[in-house]
Image: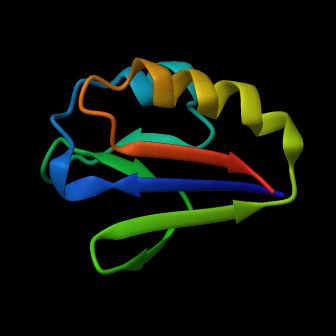
Amino acid sequence: MVVITLQRNKCIGCNYCVELAPKQFQMSKKDGKSVLLHGLEKKGFFTLKSSNEQILDDCNNASKACPVKIISVKSV
């Protein structure tokens, strides 16, 4: 199980997450911030729980590349 969390309100719109994990992230046309696809929002945090372990590497790379460190990736 992979758990990805995005703190969207702190996003600066750099687009690194989309470039490194395009199946999990996209940029919003409304405000230019990152969107975690299929993520559920709770108190400003968007979370996706997936049983697809193949997304782990791409999401870890996106997390490491994020200049404001708002992406968390855990394998549980």
Q: In this view, does 7 lie to the left or right of 6?
A: left
**At 33% across and 35% down in the image, what residue appears?**
69
* Residue 5 to residue 70: above or below: below
**At 21% across and 43% down in the image, what residue appears?**
11
| Quarter of image, res 68 | top left
**At 29% across and 80% down in the image, what residue appears?**
43
Q: Is residue 59 left or right of residue 75?
A: left
x%, y% of residue 50? 77, 59
| Quarter of image, res 34 | top left
Q: Residue furthest bottom?
A: 42
Q: Is residue 3 left or right of residue 38?
A: right
* Residue 71 to residue 64: above or below: below
x%, y% of residue 25? 49, 42
x%, y% of residue 75? 77, 48
* Residue 15 to residue 50: above or below: above
Q: How is the image coloured?
A: rainbow
